[in-house]
Amino acid sequence: SGKEKWPRGDETVWKTNMRGVDADVGDITKSVVNHVQTSLARQAYNLDNLGAYQAAALSVRDNMLVNWNETQLHYTRKAPKRAYYLSLEFLMGRTLDNALLNLDLKSQYKDGINQLGFSLEDLLEEERDAALGNGGLGRLAACYLDSSASQDLPVWGYGLRYKYGIFQQLISPEGNQLEAPDPWLDNQNPWELPRIDVNYEVRFYGQSERLSEGHGRALWTGGQEVLAVAYDVMIPGCNTRNTNNLRLWESKPKRGFDLNSFNAGNYEGAVESSNSAAAITSVLYPNDHTTFGKELRLKQQYFWTAASLADIIRRFKNLGKSINEFPDYVAIQLNDTHPTLAIPELMRILIDEEDLDWNFAWQIVTNVFFFTNHTVLPEALEKWPVPLMEHILPRHMQIIYDIKAVSNTNTFAARIFLQAVEKKFPGDRERLARMSLIEEGFPKQVRMANLACIGSRRINGVAELHSKLVQTTILKDFVEFFGVSKFGNVTNGITPRRWLDQCNPELSKLISSTLKIDKSVWLKDLYKLKDLVKYAADKGFRAEWAAIKQRNKERLAHHIETTLGFTVNTNAMFDVQIKRLHEYKRQTLNILGVIHRYLELKALTPALRKKVNPKVVFFAGKAAPAFFKTIRLIVNVARVINADPETKDYLSLYFLPDYSVSLAEVLIPASDISQHISTAGTEASGTSNMKFCLNGGLLVGTVDGANIEIAEEVGEENVFFFGHLTPAVEDLRYQHMYHPVPVDEACPPLANVLNQISGGLFGDGGVYEPLVNTIRQGDYYLVTDDFDSYIRALAMVDEAYLDRDEWVKKSICTTANMGKFSSDRAIMDYAQEYWNLEPIPVGKD
Ligand code: CRA
């Protein structure tokens, strides 16, 4: 078509019209009303909050789109190295408030929405959470996107557009968890841009025929082909025009339906294949720390990695570079082992489609990928049965066997193969078996962590202790083989935009006015909070600080009153544990502690009771079936103690159903104390611990995960540590196994609590026998061993809380020293130490 002139038509007409909504209120109301009339086809007289929210969201989206387009154009022109964050989960929560704050348009929209007769606060409540994740791993991915955009880094996320996110949790009156689907897209999602023009075909099943001897090309044909269609979600940076992209794939049938069946009158048969294609992205698996080896899950993983890689390669090819420069332009971060199939998939593309030599392809692959491990719990290490892999991905199974077994003496390639291991550790057969990509057994299984490890350039854990444990336990053999420099640590972080400015606006304002710097500065350089320390001595400042905490507690109480109908005592200390339920996180320890406190209160005289520090304990979190009983116990303990007239003013307990990002945003700023009480060595990092501390809540915790680094930063005197340390845990487990001591001897107060449960104080004791028995027998997570020290730590919390001045000082010093835990620091660490990425600010050159 020759040389076309771009833009077509009159360039100045284009240029003067290419802009977002102006920041003045008049322009904003005009744009919102315009969306009401045109995009929504509604009118002023029948507009409800939902409609007004949608129109406001579309108007804000217009603004983001201008920046988003400009950013993509800028990145294309500058052609920098880019990083791609592959995560099966992105727990984004709501977008409107975050977008308004990052774009610095909140006050203008507030006024504009007011002029139209609505309140922005109400509209914000209309938005449904994008809950495409289970917990920490998915929320971390969301924080990292915010930090990448805010620091002008050319990073895109790739994930799946699940039709149903994490299930909605309901709690029955008996205390059972009930699950309902989360049809989050039912109201339409103004934050996504369907890209019907961006789509790829992804193959499953079929046959793979080797075209040459050895490990050369193969031809993979037949089977099922499914279409991956892109949906883009804009990620606005804070105080910058850089707006990055999160690309989520939806599965669609390649052909709408089978015309032959349709013509033959078989209407159901005609849509069958289309249903199976659509099923791939229909639902997020609600598994946290477990794998269940489901065929559909494997299909999700491959569908997503194949589409993402095809897209990444297409973008790279547009640069006109040769394929051996791929690692100079592309870094791919594997968020846990879920995207590990990207490793054999890139091998397949390079060998079968680009016709590269095996070793050369492997060299490219091992320079592109980076792998983050998020847990050392064995039940979370992914393995796929070889027969299943062979069936669904026959070509990839060949490649995995090639990686495992290829006998090539090329020095680069050889060092990764079993022969090389054998050479380095001759005769060490057990080591060979441990390091193999294939675990022997019936059936044989592919070990995804080993594959991720062998195929990546660098590997990291998510907190100092965790990274050390990764290197000395699950990946020890690989450290000894590759050398320790391939392994690193990037301690997790959280975005202070959402987790301070957005969820705690009053505290944010107080910080800015006290430090006399604009929030856009300290929100992007969180170490600036350090200067707050000197105000801890200022009585007036402390009073303001405490008053904000009090108002946040009242905000939470109001939320609970309106949603659940309970009246919460806001004069009490608020003690919060919110996270997925899991045995290792020890919600049991917490609830047993609550019961212990209740029994102690009951034993006091009314006069003595009056001296007790009143406390309200909050729990929230979703559970897998194995942990339903813990919720049931919490709910039934709440039922009993909240109704006890003797004690209810001193101790009450709430289990808040359907924990979500949005609920966390109300709970976290309201906490006086929060609990992070995993058995030492089990919680890789934790990130809610950081959120509480950033909001001036103090921490009760074990010496585990990022708790340790938080204490290093804020000072151990401001943290309530308890429990056995990591090195003791193995020994204690060994003792339990070979020299068991009954709970009655090991810890009489705990035995008393367990007996009360079994005796029926909280309803039928038999219901709780399985739960109670995990502690009476085996006690793998050491509840008994840590109980006394836990109770003592809580007593110290009570004592510290009595001296309110000192408490507020601790609270201030905690917030002030949280600079390290900004996800900006974490993502910069990845950019510099792993990806080799530079910021590419838009509009600054
Ligand atoms: N559950 C860890 O357990 C960690 C996050 C993010 C987890 C947390 O301690 O903070 O990852 N691990 O790094 C995980 O998902 C598969 O492993 C988590 O979210």
Image: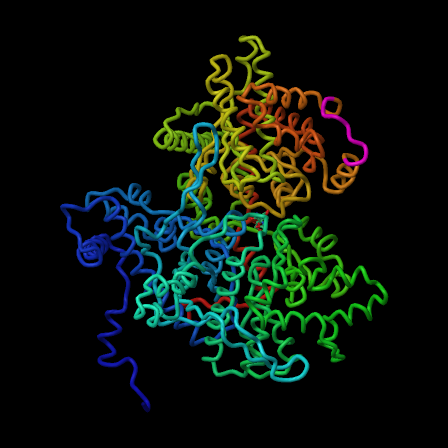
In the displayed orientation, state which residue is furthest to the right.
Answer: 427
* Above or below, 208 relative to 470: below
The quadrant of the image that shows the N terminus is: bottom left
Number of marks drawn: 0
In the displayed structure, 350 sits above or below 553; it is below
Q: Is residue 113 visible?
A: yes
Magenta segment: does it hold 265? no
In the image shown, does 545 or 744 lie closer to the viewer? Answer: 744
Q: Quadrant of residue 362?
A: bottom right
Colour convention: rainbow
Q: Is residue 740 covered in magenta? A: yes
Query: Which sits in the foreground, 752 or 832?
Result: 752
Which residue shows up at 75% across the image and 64% down it?
Answer: 483
Q: Quadrant of the C terminus?
A: bottom left
Question: Measured along the vertical axis of the image, is residue 196 above or below residue 431?
Answer: below
Percent x, y of residue 834: 61, 64
Q: Position of residue 702 (x, y in %)?
A: 65, 37
Q: Which residues are magenta?
A: 737-744
Residue 162 in the image: x percent, y percent? Answer: 42, 56
Horizontal and vertical percent position of residue 743 = 72, 25
At a point 39% along the width and 73% down the height, the residue shown is: 73
* Nearer to me, 389 or 775: 389
Between residue 574 and residue 618, name the one nearer to us.
Answer: 618
Q: Residue furthest front?
A: 264
Left or right for 144, reference 238? right
